[in-house]
Image: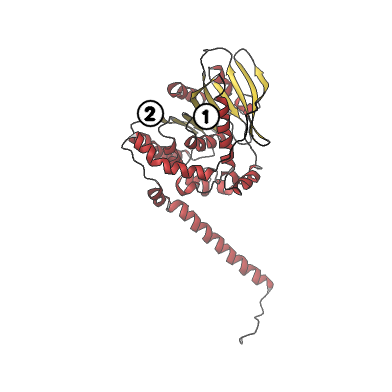
Amino acid sequence: MEYGQVRDISSGYLERSAEDQQSILRRETEDYLRSLILDDYPKRQACFWKRDYSSLEAFLQSVEPNRQRWTVALGSFQPEGDFEPEEEPFLEDTKVKAFWVSIRFARHLRCRAILALPKKGKKTKLPLVIAQHGISSNPERVMGFLDGPNYYHAYGYQLAAAGYAVMAPQHLTGLERRRYQRLALLLGATLAGLEVSKLKRFLDYLGTRREVDPERIAMWGISLGGYYTLLSLPVEPRIKLGICCAFFNHRLEKMIVDDPRYSCFLSTEEEHIFIPGWLREFRDADLISLICPRPFLIQTGKADGVSWWPWVVREFQQAKTHYEKLGLADRFQLDLHSGGHEIRYESGLAFLKKWL
């Protein structure tokens, strides 16, 4: 064919050729990005983490730059004005009195939670447990309502009956979260950053209430609530203890590697979970080093499809080295059980009694 002549090529061939080119480009791109995340993570760890275990003070100082970068990754939002609290009764029986509390965050946005208190007990200020619900759920389930499968085991109610003040915050659930994640990203922040900022605002408010001991605050969340527990403690020092149920994971694989043994976030529509810079340096074992030396319990069910439990054990063992090197191994524990995606009330209560 002479130069300048147009080759007679069918449109079907052109379409197939163009799709083939896109196919290889897609696979090459995913392979490249996946390789950067998985294969190069150890190099980034060596670059970004300079932990010093010579003393607890030295350790905390050495991880402070990472804590600041995690704070930036989440993003933060500033509250405005007075709390303007409002209360509405929720339940009352012989053991517990609970009510909805609403406080102003900023402009027209309010923070809402169920606050439950024991009816009987000491007259002194009570230890507080932030009981965080999971995805497609609500604070009512924390208190034992609307929970047909009994994933929650009414742990919020049980804790209040056992003598704790319990706050069950309400956060956004459902796939529509991606809409608010996109809005937050346009501000250089994340939906998680907004939820953590609202939690901080609630702690500011609870510090003004006579029932709550501000020096004895724990957070115990399941699923998406476990996500907020793991994300919040590194940036909120007022929370002295954490219990992460049905979320702690081998984060690299969980986020980007499809596997029939667990669900992978890359193949879901849960856009809110993708925090810019998360897998640059903050896999779960590394986030734990921003929580250390505070006591932390992980609850994982072998039958829970959100994780493949041998990998959870591996991540736990890596995370525990931070506590071990500081002589504090008993503060970091794993409750690995044969159940599924559910609260383990007895082990959580024992952990609270020991450390809070």
Please, what secondary structure does the residue beneath circle 1 have?
Answer: strand
Farthest-out residue, left = 54
Residue at x 55% of width, y 29% of height: 204
How many neighbours does mark 1 have within 10 angstroms: few (below 14), some (14-19), or many (20 or more)?
A: many
Which amino acid type is shown beneath numbered disc 2? Asp
Q: Is residue 63 left or right of residue 270?
A: left
* Dot 2 crowding, Cα within 10 Å, few <14, some 14–19, many 20+: few
- Residue named by callout 2: 330
Taking the view exactly as shown, the residue that stands out farthest to the bottom is 2
* Residue closest to the far front: 81
Q: Does the rendering let one see residue 147?
A: no
Residue 210 in the image, given as x and y percentages of width and height: 55, 19
Please name the amino acid that badge 1 sits on: Trp
Pick the quarter of the image with the N terminus.
bottom right
Nearer-the-camera pick, 301 or 89: 89
Separation of marks 2 and 1 at Cα, in angstroms? 18 Å
Q: Residue at x 65, y 45 (%)?
A: 179
Q: Residue 130 appears in which quarter of the rendering?
A: top right
Q: Nearer the viewer, residue 162 or 31?
A: 162
| 186 lies left or right of 349 | right
The image position of residue 286, as x and y in percent, is 43, 41
Residue 119 percent location from the top left of the image: 59, 13
x and y percentages locating residue 92 in the rendered image: 65, 16
Question: Going 59% across and 42% down the picture, which residue do you hit?
Answer: 191
**Element under disc 2:** helix
Q: Foreground: 148 or 88?
A: 88
Q: Which mark is residue 220?
A: 1
Tell me if I can see residue 229 in this picture.
Answer: yes
Q: Earlier in the sequence, mark 2 or mark 1?
A: 1
Residue plotted at (65% across, 68% down): 15
